[in-house]
Amino acid sequence: MKVDASNPLWRFRGITSTAMLFFAYLYLPIVILIALSFNENRLATIWTGFTTDWYVVALSNDDMLRAAQNSLVVAVSATVIATIAATLAAMGMSRGRFRGETGVSAMLALPLLVPEVVTAIATLLFFVAIGIKLGLVTIIIAHTVFCIPFAYLPIRARLEGMDPSLTEAANDLYANEWKAFRRVTLPLLWPGILSGAMLSFIISLDDFVISNFVGGAGATTLPIYIFGMIRIGNTPEVNAISAMMLLVSIIFVSVSFLIDRIRY
């Protein structure tokens, strides 16, 4: 493991080994999961040989495909709505200080601090109180509210890094507010919007707690379906489905990270 010798942190004895143990603890279970997804034995923890049959079985499972479709519908819908709301909120918050700004910022960040199970219970009680039937619609609404702060943070960070003189120059050239936003602000803000959208998508796609609380009959998402399979018994099919979800998550997180590093 190559380290930066100029960093005073590495002078402490045991820092390198501690870091390696941390990464091993973090990623070794993932490596084991992927390896066991190719296990020929139906018993997921006993290795007998290599096969890709469990991926074929998983992709031929109609119930799994239906759950994956529900997850995609929820994730795409929640991502679009949450990203639009987060963009509008970030634009409004960046226009200068106003009375109650601290309170609004705290409200936007609150879902990040509140335990997810508390948010799920509160959302369920709200839906029951107003008489909304639980289903995919309620999951989309709950995921949208939960994802807004995650989309807001990269968009707001992008706005704070933008040079306001660019918009002022567009206004000096007789561009109205909409034209200045469309031709100047939006292209510069686009990497932050994409980063926030991808982060929201992967959080919604992987969510179990909120979906489990506010989902009704016929609204089984992929994480809920996987949990149901594990309760029956862990098989390589479960590992294969989890590995495919992991691959999707890694792709989206990596793309989000790369987009967030784009500089204008």
Image: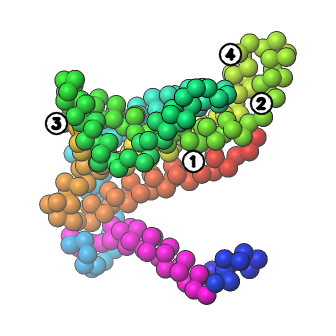
Eye-nearest disc, 4 or 2: 2
Which of pointers 4 and 1 lies earlier in the amino acid sequence? Answer: 4
In the image, 251 versus 18, the foreground residue is: 18
Label 3 to label 1: alpha-carbon separation: 33 Å
Label 3 to label 4: alpha-carbon separation: 44 Å
Label 4 to label 2: alpha-carbon separation: 15 Å
Are there few (<14), some (14-19), or many (20+) residues within 10 Å of tag 4?
Answer: few
Residue 70 x %, y %: 30, 38
The image quarter in which residue 121 lies: top left
| Side (left or right) of 260 relative to 214 | right
Residue type, numbered disc 2:
Pro
Q: Label 2's element?
A: helix
Q: Disc 3 marks which residue?
A: 217
Q: Disc 2 marks which residue?
A: 164
Which of pointers 2 and 3 lies earlier in the amino acid sequence? Answer: 2
Q: Which mark is residue 74?
A: none
Q: Label 3's element?
A: loop
Residue type, numbered disc 1:
Ser
In the image, 244 versus 122, the foreground residue is: 122
Give the quarter of the figure containing the N terminus: bottom right
Q: Label 4's element?
A: helix
The image quarter in which residue 164 lies: top right
Q: Are marks 2 and 1 in contact (CB under 8 Å)?
A: no
Q: Disc 1 marks which residue?
A: 256
The image quarter in which residue 130 lies: top left
Q: Disc 4 marks which residue?
A: 178
Residue type, numbered disc 3:
Ala
Residue type, numbered disc 4:
Trp
Which portion, as a residue range, is magenta? 13-42
